[in-house]
Image (tube, rainbow, N blue to C red):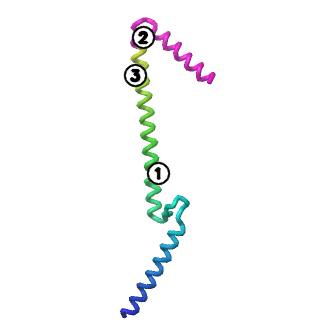
Amino acid sequence: EFASERESLRTELAELKRELCQVRSSESPRGRVRIHGPLATELEVERLARQRLEAALESQRDAFEMQLAAEKLLKSGTQSAATGSGLDESVATHERVESGLKGG
């Protein structure tokens, strides 16, 4: 009984060693082991979730910067309007920016 169990364990050990050799031989050029199966799927899901989160944060950052720019423009427009030439100044600035964009 012990002999058959020992033989079974030796066989299992040999299989595990072969499997380990296969994993080591399938290393990528960067020296990292390729991951397969459920762990690879889980890592892919996490990578995609991280990309979506980064995209959402970038979108929020852009929206915040646009809001900040609009508030600054409103503030400068209000201050310029107090001097009497705010709208004309804003229109002229806008036209210069647009012509610069079309020319560039």
| Marks 1 and 3, the one that precedes in the sequence | 1
Q: Position of residue 37 (x, y in %)?
A: 48, 65
Under mark 2, the amino acid is: Ser
The residue under label 3 is: 71
Q: Does the magenta stretch include residue 85?
A: yes
Q: Where is residue 102 in the image (x, y as percent from the top left)?
A: 62, 23
Under mark 3, the amino acid is: Glu
Name the chief secondary structure element in magenta.
helix
- Calculate the distance from the C-alpha at mark 3 to the C-alpha at mark 2: 14 Å
| Residue 92 sits above or below residue 18 on the image | above
Other residues around mark 2 within 10 Å, as few (<14) / some (14–19) / many (≥20): some
| Residue 100 sits above or below residue 86 on the image | below
Quarter assignment of residue 75: top left
Q: Residue at 39% of width from left, 12% of height from top?
A: 79
Other residues around mark 1 within 10 Å, as few (<14) / some (14–19) / many (≥20): few
Q: Nearer the viewer, residue 6 or 63?
A: 6
The residue under label 2 is: 80
Q: Bounds of the magenta span?
A: 78-104
| Marks 3 and 2, the one that precedes in the sequence | 3
Quadrant into which the N terminus falls:
bottom left
The residue under label 1 is: 48
Mark 3 in CB contact with mark 2 (< 8 angstroms): no
Q: In this view, does 4 lie to the left or right of 31?
A: left
Query: Which element type, helix, strand or loop, lies under badge 1?
Result: helix
- Calculate the distance from the C-alpha at mark 1 to the C-alpha at mark 3: 35 Å
Q: Nearer the viewer, residue 64 or 3?
A: 3
Under mark 1, the amino acid is: Leu
Can you name the residue that lies furthest to the right here? 103
Query: Which element type, helix, strand or loop, lies under badge 2?
Result: helix
Q: Is residue 74 magenta?
A: no
| Residue 4 sits above or below residue 93 on the image | below
